[in-house]
Amino acid sequence: MISAKRVPIQFHSATLLLTIDLIGTFVFAVEGASAAVQANLDILGLMVLGFATALGGGIIRDVLIGAIPPNSIRDWRYPAAAFSGAAVVFLQSSFVNRVPAPLITTLDAAGLALFAVAGAAKALDYNIHPFLAVLMGGITGVGGGTIRDVLLARIPSVLRSDVYAAAGLAGAITMVLALKLKLRPAIATTLGIVVCFTLRMVAVHQHWNLPRVMKH
């Protein structure tokens, strides 16, 4: 009996993937550095937190899928984008302190959407099964923020925020399904980003939460 061999779904758009990755890196670095400012850290702490928030999830993903050494170490553009985002926050800290909370939430949702989709896309290009590629997208989206919260000694937002990781997974699933339907990578990527971003923002405004165990 001949078993059918699974045909892997692949992304195959290196330029688009790199662009999404770098934009997401910059956005998350700004967010991480902003958290450092709020925690009253010095410039070294600000840079470390910006780097960890921007690249932590990608490093975890690359290690898990066998992309060694990770892009953030192999490609100078990744740390450059991360440190640039952190530097912008340091040089404009007075402005950052006046940034309204809704804008920070929007930036966070944008970074989550970009990273979740980029993480899943890269996993697909390494012939990872689509189901696991979706998980890699989720890890890429929330990994850096989790490291940031651990460094700041607080409960990671992914464990308590309104539909945070779930939004990242939804975006990754949308992109994978779109590729499965033979849509172009640019269209599949856009759909995934829109779904993740929209779900996250709606969840914040509507105060949606995943089910929790009720205390007695």
Image (spheres, grey):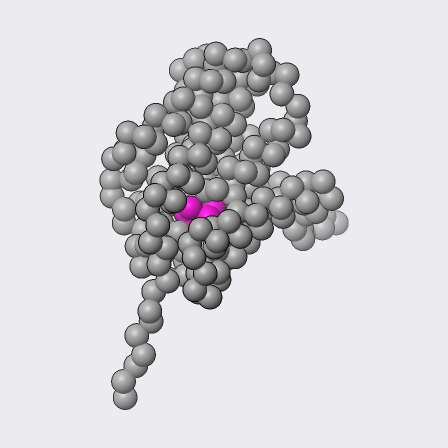
Task: Describe residue 122's horizontal placement relative to residue 100 as left or right.
Answer: left
* Rendered location of residue 85, percent (x, y): 44, 23
Q: Does any portion of residue 52 appear in the rendered image? A: yes
> Which residue does the image show at 52% across and 43% down from the upper left?
113
Give the prevailing secondary structure in the magenta stretch: helix
| Residue 117 on the magenta span | yes
In the depicted view, which residue is nearer to us: 160 or 56?
Answer: 56
| Residue 89 on the magenta span | no
Residue 170 image-quadrant placement: bottom right
In the depicted view, which residue is nearer to us: 178 or 206?
Answer: 178
Residue lying at the far bottom of the rendered structure: 1
Q: Does any portion of residue 147 appear in the rendered image? A: no
In the depicted view, which residue is nearer to us: 125 or 34?
Answer: 125
* Rendered location of residue 81, percent (x, y): 38, 27
Q: Count up the numbered dots.
A: 0
> Which residue does the image show at 44% across and 51% down from the upper left?
186
Task: Describe residue 40's horizontal placement relative to residue 48 as left or right.
Answer: right
> Which residue does the image show at 61% across and 34% down from the upper left?
106
The stretch in magenta equals 116-120
> Which residue does the image show at 41% across and 30% down from the upper left?
52
In the depicted view, which residue is nearer to us: 71 or 149?
Answer: 71
* Rendered location of residue 95, percent (x, y): 58, 14
* Image vertical order of residue 31 relative to residue 177, above or below: above
* Image vertical order of residue 130 relative to residue 207, above or below: below
* Rendered location of residue 7, percent (x, y): 33, 69
Q: Quadrant of the N terminus?
A: bottom left
